[in-house]
Image (cartoon, helix red, strand yellow):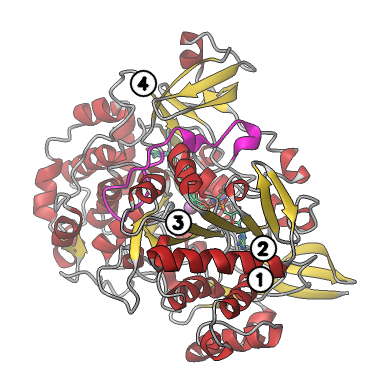
């Protein structure tokens, strides 16, 4: 029996450290690792579910070739790689290397992920994607305002006297944060939750504010109006550290409680109470989730929210600040800066075309010069997770050839010509960072891959040879197959930081230079070296106003044919489309539902247990109805992640539409109608 230190590599705030027990080559237990101050309780149900997931009978253990729709047969690695190499050479010869789309998303984290794009560069170029499905509008709003994306240590939240969980459902998506919320509450802090849904997080709140979706920018401007009017601003802080306050104060002047209430649907008395709390309780932390940045007006919304902290002087102190994304662990160069999501403007050695992640389907179809012929998908499930599923499917079906690397037959894998089996978190070592705490961690290899599974780096090594690259060429960007060379490669990345793999084998290590309190020197790396309420860069880069003005989200608010706003948030027992096939998960997450308020249900003759047809001009899904007494009227909810096996992705209904900044996806800006399914 051996116990290893490792970490969960899913795209999740918590990024838990774990101790994993291996007996006779099999993982038999997953326990907490006390060395991580942010996640001492250890894994959630999903993390414990790896005991089932890694050995699940549905796991793909060898290459598969499509025979006809929905039917795959086992083939050898030799046959699979020969076929793929042949198709790649055909595509390159006929249309050039940019006829190959390389699509990867957030299925797993790790430094070795970068080997994918390095391989496709060595191939001669490729079509890549820019933007991101997840968080870029908020990242960009934060960068424009504060200069960079860092925040106080997770445990510092216990020092706050006011915690505003704004569009963040930590009790489900960052459950370790709730311990620090509780510690603050025990010390007498107030907690306010702002969310159109009554979430599990709201159970901890002194006040739940339920705005109409996509109107948080207006709410923030209305709150700023009251805080300024009451004289609750921190004028010394503003004079020294805030750029553009006078203009901002003018912008919020017309945002009276009356007007704010009308736009946001939040009662005036609640707006007053919220402003009073924000103006008088210090220190205040706003923990901003990703919910309200999935709208067309998202970036400006986040900038308006940030302004509330700036005018009350809530930066650079314990218990104060903006908790959105902490990129302190991005010390290896990539994604340190949201600018990395931008389409490439400079020539980068290989001619490269880049298309929008948010508009993936439409952009794939539109690409002409050269047209796309081949797609390689790894760590992503675009037929379930990207907007406008029907377009994405159409675009994939139009290609000559598709390869998907995954551990399961996902909606995307079902479209593939060849499916290659992917590793699990226990089967190759890698180094991972995080975006809530600042620990660097070794996701350690603890067992051999089962069946014929090969890690992506080995797949690229073998494929590269078949495409005529020498081992010398390949060594330039890939570790050689084998554990020793992977470890040497990882140690090489750690060397500049003065950290050893040996240290990481013992437990998580804080990234060098991580502050306990962000911006404690009150230096903000913006053009004005202050917090920018006024941003010239916002105007130049994104063609938005220099101040965080409010624009209505595009769909849903206006009534019309599709008067309900469909929110499709993340939920406790899945990470997007992952984990849903596990028995242990299905006991708690039996399937997708349409959550609808009583009034909206009654108006449509719907009752709990009925099947609903949820539709708009883009598509429809059929879902069993759950009456939700905690929802604001006019809002319906269905969690994302479920696929065709259970009625179809909710993204059949969403439009591929970018956010106002950062090239994010405006998933929740989505009007629908609901009726009883026949
Ligand atoms: N409607 C709607 N859609 C959404 C969202 C929403 O709020 N509403 N949220 C968006 C957000 S925030 C995100 S981050 C995206 C997530 O979008 P994706 O990253 O595409 O989704 P996942 O389901 O997490 O993972 C994709 C696949 O990666 C595979 N995978 C896991 N580990 C590995 C590995 O080591 N190698 C390989 N090759 N594959 C692996 C998994 O099996 C899974 O099939 O979804 C977005 N989609
Ligand atoms: N269990 C679990 N944990 C996860 C994930 C997961 O899939 N499952 N995914 C991980 C990833 S990739 C991400 S991006 C994060 C996301 O973590 P969160 O930001 O917490 O989750 P979201 O579902 O994006 O949105 C949070 C809340 O925003 C609310 N919301 C939607 N529209 C609005 C609005 O207009 N205004 C306001 N105020 N609120 C609104 C939703 O109702 C939701 O409760 O979670 C990470 N952690
Ligand atoms: Mo995400």
Pointer 4 or 2: first along the chain: 2
The residue at label 1 has a CB less than 8 Å from ligand 1? yes
**Foreground tag (3 vs 2):** 3
Residue located beneath label 2 in the image: 422
Residue located beneath label 4 in the image: 563
Q: Decide: marks 2, 1 in contact (CB < 8 A)?
A: yes
Q: Helix, strand or loop at disc 1?
A: loop
Q: Decide: marks 3, 2 in contact (CB < 8 A)?
A: no
Residue 72: x and y in percent read 71, 49
Specify whether 547 is left or right of 566: left
Residue 413 within the segment the image draws in magenta: no
Q: Sort mark 3 into few (<14), some (14-19) or many (20+) by Cα contacts within 10 Å.
A: many
Residue located beneath label 3 in the image: 373
Q: What's drawn in magenta, residue-wise? A: 642-667
Residue located beneath label 1 in the image: 455
Q: Residue at x 60, y 74 (%)?
A: 463
Q: CA distance from mark 3 to mark 2?
A: 23 Å
Q: Residue at x 68, y 71 (%)?
A: 6
Q: CA distance from mark 3 to mark 1?
A: 25 Å
Residue 343: x and y in percent read 30, 63
Residue 645 within the segment the image draws in magenta: yes
Examine the rendering and report whether any part of residue 109 can be seen: no
Q: CA distance from mark 4 to mark 2?
A: 42 Å
Q: Decide: marks 3, 1 in contact (CB < 8 A)?
A: no
**Foreground tag (4 vs 3):** 3
């Amino acid at each position: 029996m051996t116990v290893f230190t490792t970490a969960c590599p899913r795209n999740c705030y918590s990024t838990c450290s774990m101790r994993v027990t291996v007996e006779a080559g099999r993982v038999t237990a997953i326990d907490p690792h006390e060395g991580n101050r942010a996640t001492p309780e250890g894994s959630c149900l999903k993390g414990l579910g790896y005991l089932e997931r890694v050995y699940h009978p549905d796991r793909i253990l060898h290459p598969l070739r499509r025979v006809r729709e929905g039917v795959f047969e086992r083939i050898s690695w030799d046959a699979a790689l020969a076929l793929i190499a042949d198709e790649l050479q055909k595509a390159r010869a006929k249309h050039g290397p940019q006829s190959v789309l390389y699509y990867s998303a957030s299925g797993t984290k790790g430094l070795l992920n970068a080997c994918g794009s390095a391989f496709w560069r060595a191939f001669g170029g490729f079509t890549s994607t820019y933007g991101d499905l997840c968080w870029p509008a908020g990242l960009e709003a934060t960068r424009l305002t504060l200069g960079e994306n860092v925040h106080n240590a997770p445990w510092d939240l216990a020092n706050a006297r006011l915690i505003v969980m704004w569009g963040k459902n930590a009790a489900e998506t960052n459950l370790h944060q709730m311990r620090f919320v509780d510690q603050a509450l025990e010390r007498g802090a107030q907690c306010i939750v702002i969310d159109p849904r009554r979430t599990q997080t709201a159970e901890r709140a002194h006040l739940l504010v339920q705005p109409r979706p996509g109107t948080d920018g207006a709410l923030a401007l209305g709150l700023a109006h009251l805080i300024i009017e009451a004289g609750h601003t921190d004028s010394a802080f503003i004079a020294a550290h805030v750029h553009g306050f006078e203009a901002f104060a003018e912008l919020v002047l017309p945002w009276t409680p009356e007007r704010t209430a009308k736009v946001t649907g939040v009662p005036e008395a609640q707006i007053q109470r919220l402003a009073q709390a924000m103006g008088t309780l210090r220190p205040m932390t706003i923990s901003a989730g990703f919910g309200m940045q999935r709208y067309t007006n998202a970036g400006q919304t986040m900038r308006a929210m940030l302004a509330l902290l700036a005018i009350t002087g809530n930066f650079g102190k314990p218990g104060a600040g903006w908790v959105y994304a902490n990129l302190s662990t991005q010390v290896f160069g990539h994604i340190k800066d949201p600018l990395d999501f931008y389409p490439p403007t400079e020539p980068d050695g290989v001619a490269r075309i880049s298309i929008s992640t948010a508009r993936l389907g439409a952009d794939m179809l539109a690409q002409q010069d050269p047209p796309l012929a081949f797609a390689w998908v790894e760590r992503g499930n675009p037929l379930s997770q990207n907007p406008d599923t029907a377009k994405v499917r159409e675009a994939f079906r139009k290609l000559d050839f598709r390869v998907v690397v995954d551990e399961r037959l996902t909606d995307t894998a079902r479209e593939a010509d060849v499916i290659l089996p992917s590793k699990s978190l226990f089967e190759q070592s890698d180094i991972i960072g995080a975006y809530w705490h600042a620990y660097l961690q070794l996701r350690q290899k603890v067992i051999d891959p089962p069946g014929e599974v090969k890690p992506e780096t080995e797949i690229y090594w073998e494929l590269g040879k078949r495409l005529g690259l020498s081992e010398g060429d390949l060594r330039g960007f890939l570790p050689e197959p084998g554990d020793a060379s992977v470890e040497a490669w990882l140690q090489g990345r750690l060397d500049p930081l003065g950290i050893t793999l040996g240290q990481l084998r013992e437990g998580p290590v804080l990234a060098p230079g991580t502050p306990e309190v962000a911006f404690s020197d009150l230096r903000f790396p913006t053009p004005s070296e202050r917090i920018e309420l006024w941003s010239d860069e916002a105007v130049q880069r994104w063609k938005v106003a220099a101040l965080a003005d409010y624009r209505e989200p595009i769909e849903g608010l206006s009534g019309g044919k599709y008067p309900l706003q469909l929110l499709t948030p993340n939920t406790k027992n899945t990470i997007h489309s992952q984990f849903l096939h596990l028995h242990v998960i299905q006991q708690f997450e039996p399937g997708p539902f349409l959550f609808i308020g009583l009034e909206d249900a009654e108006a449509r003759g719907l009752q709990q247990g009925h099947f609903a047809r949820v539709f708009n001009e883009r598509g429809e899904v059929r879902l069993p109805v759950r009456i939700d007494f905690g929802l604001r009227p006019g809002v319906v909810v269905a969690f994302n992640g479920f696929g065709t096996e259970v009625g179809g992705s909710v993204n059949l209904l969403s439009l591929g539409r970018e956010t106002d900044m950062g090239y994010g996806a405006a998933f929740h800006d989505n009007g629908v109608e609901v009726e009883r399914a026949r």
